[in-house]
Amino acid sequence: MAEFLNPFSGLTPDKKMSLSELIRAIRLSIAAEEEAIHLYTAQADATDHPLAKKVLLDIADEERVHAGEFLRLLQILTQDEDQFLAEGKQEVEEMREELYQEGKIVEGEPPTVGPLKES
Ligand SMILES: [Fe+2]
């Protein structure tokens, strides 16, 4: 997010980033994209103005593309991010399968809880 109060935020540093610093910067950029997605989606949810809602959701989708670009860059830079992401995905799939077997979720139904569930 913008740092308008910091007069040094736009200055080029004296040295280039190391690989480790670049990786951390990309992780921050991914977080910034996710924050923007959250903000624009929340704003779209909070208005009934059709044009504002359409523009906000369109921009939110563009931020999702940006997040994907940063994520791919992170995968290239770290060379092991895919392994960690795959491990996390597998853990969720195992939990999902467990709940499905217990009849606590229905295949194809988006997961919602209590008052969040639309009637
Ligand atoms: Fe973006």
Image (cartoon, rainbow, N blue to C red):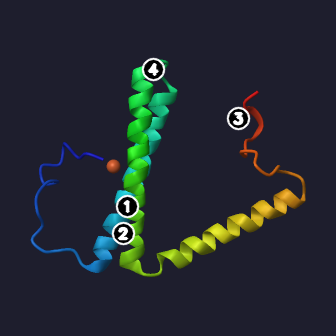
The amino acid beneath tag 1 is: Glu
Given contact means CB atoms under 8 Å apart, are the residues at marks 1 and 2 in contact? yes
Which residue does the numbered mark 1 point to in the structure image?
A: 69
Which residue does the numbered mark 2 point to in the structure image?
A: 73
The residue closer to the viewer here, 88 or 14, is: 88
| Outermost residue toward the top in this view | 49
Indicate left or right for 44 with 69 as reference: right
Q: Nearer the viewer, mark 1 or mark 3?
A: 1
| Outermost residue toward the bottom in this view | 79
The residues bearing labels 2 and 3 have C-alpha atoms spaced at a distance of 35 Å
Which residue does the numbered mark 4 point to in the structure image?
A: 50
The residues bearing labels 4 and 2 have C-alpha atoms spaced at a distance of 35 Å
The residues bearing labels 1 and 3 have C-alpha atoms spaced at a distance of 31 Å
The residues bearing labels 1 and 4 have C-alpha atoms spaced at a distance of 29 Å
The amino acid beneath tag 2 is: Leu
Which residue does the numbered mark 3 point to in the structure image?
A: 116
Image point (76%, 64%), residue name: 95
User: Which numbered disc, 1 or 3, marks the residue that appears first in the sequence?
Assistant: 1
The amino acid beneath tag 3 is: Leu
Q: Is residue 52 above or below residue 80?
A: above
Image point (32%, 78%), residue name: 20
**Mark 4 lies within 8 Å of ligand 1 (Cβ measured):** no
Q: Secondary structure at mark 3?
A: helix
